[in-house]
Image (cartoon, rainbow, N blue to C red):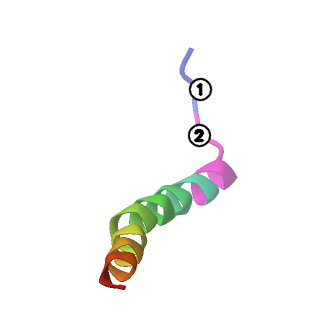
Amino acid sequence: MIPDEIPLPLAIILIPTLWAIAGYRLWILPALAKKGTHE
């Protein structure tokens, strides 16, 4: 069964969390890797 509505607090928490994880993987990890290999 698909719920009639998605809980709004869940969406408010989940969506920015997904963006934060994506940003971390795309920008922060490569930056740390580059900084580590530079030394």
Q: Is residue 17 magenta?
A: no
Query: What secondary structure characterizes most of the magenta part?
Result: helix
Residue in the foreground of this view, choosing between 35 and 7: 35
Q: Residues within 10 Å of mark 2 (few under 14, many from 20)?
A: few
Query: Quarter-wise, where is residue 33 in the image?
Result: bottom left
Q: Which residue is mark 2?
A: 6
Q: Is residue 13 left or right of residue 33?
A: right
Disc 2 marks a residue whose amino acid type is: Ile
Q: Is residue 37 above or below residue 9?
A: below
> Where in the figure is residue 3, as x and y percent of width and height?
59, 26
Q: Which mark is residue 3?
A: 1
Residue at (60% x, 59% y) in the render? 12
Q: Are marks 1 and 2 in contact (CB under 8 Å)?
A: yes
Q: Is residue 15 left or right of residue 30?
A: right
Residue at (52% x, 63% y) in the render? 16
> Where in the figure is residue 37, as x and y percent of width and height?
32, 76
